[in-house]
Image (cartoon, rainbow, N blue to C red):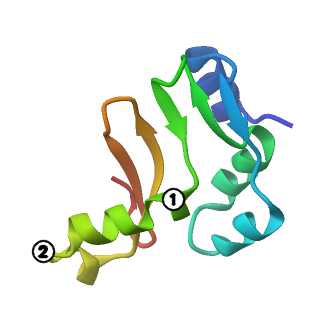
Amino acid sequence: MLDENLEEFLREFGQPTSQRFPTASEVEQYRGILPDRLLEYWQEIGFSGYMDGLFWIVNPADYDDVVERFLESTDFPELDTYHVIARNAWGKLHLWGKKQGIH
């Protein structure tokens, strides 16, 4: 069942043009780390691309190495634990900090 936020997202971005649904273990790996609502969205719409690849909801595990390398020379790893939850076609990564939320 879609909630108001997901309905609005789909109105703006349209239906997925690419989609892969997570396994139960992929969802459970992030329980207590990412918001429960996001995990529900994964189960509703999967890891999916929109507008022919302009925006993607992604599996954070696919980007763990990227985040680690990007943040290794900063103080950010001491502040929070970050996971990529979305990206766009130009490489902008949308991060979720366990303590601080979206970045």
Please name the residue shown 71% across and 45% down the image: 41
As helix, strand or loop, the secondary structure at mark 1 comes to helix
As helix, strand or loop, the secondary structure at mark 2 comes to loop
The answer to which image quadrant residue 23 occupies is bottom right
Q: Is residue 96 above or below residue 1?
A: below
* Residue on which the image places disc 1: 62
Please name the residue shown 64% across and 36% down the image: 48
Q: Quadrant of the N terminus?
A: top right
> Residue flagged by tag 2: what amino acid is it?
Ser
The answer to which image quadrant residue 26 occupies is bottom right
Q: Position of residue 66 (x, y in %)?
A: 34, 62
- Horizontally, residue 25 falls left or right of residue 77, namely right
Q: Nearer the viewer, residue 100 or 87?
A: 87
Q: Position of residue 99 (x, y in %)?
A: 41, 72
Q: Is residue 8 above or below residue 79?
A: above
Please name the residue shown 67% across and 25% down the image: 16
Residue 73 circle label: 2
Residue 100 circle label: none
The answer to which image quadrant residue 97 occupies is bottom left
- Horizontally, residue 81 falls left or right of residue 5, namely left
Q: Categorize mark 2 by other alpha carbons within 10 Å: few (<14), some (14-19), many (20+).
A: few
Q: Position of residue 61 (x, y in %)?
A: 54, 64
Q: Is residue 69 above or below residue 9?
A: below
Please name the residue shown 51% across and 25% down the image: 53
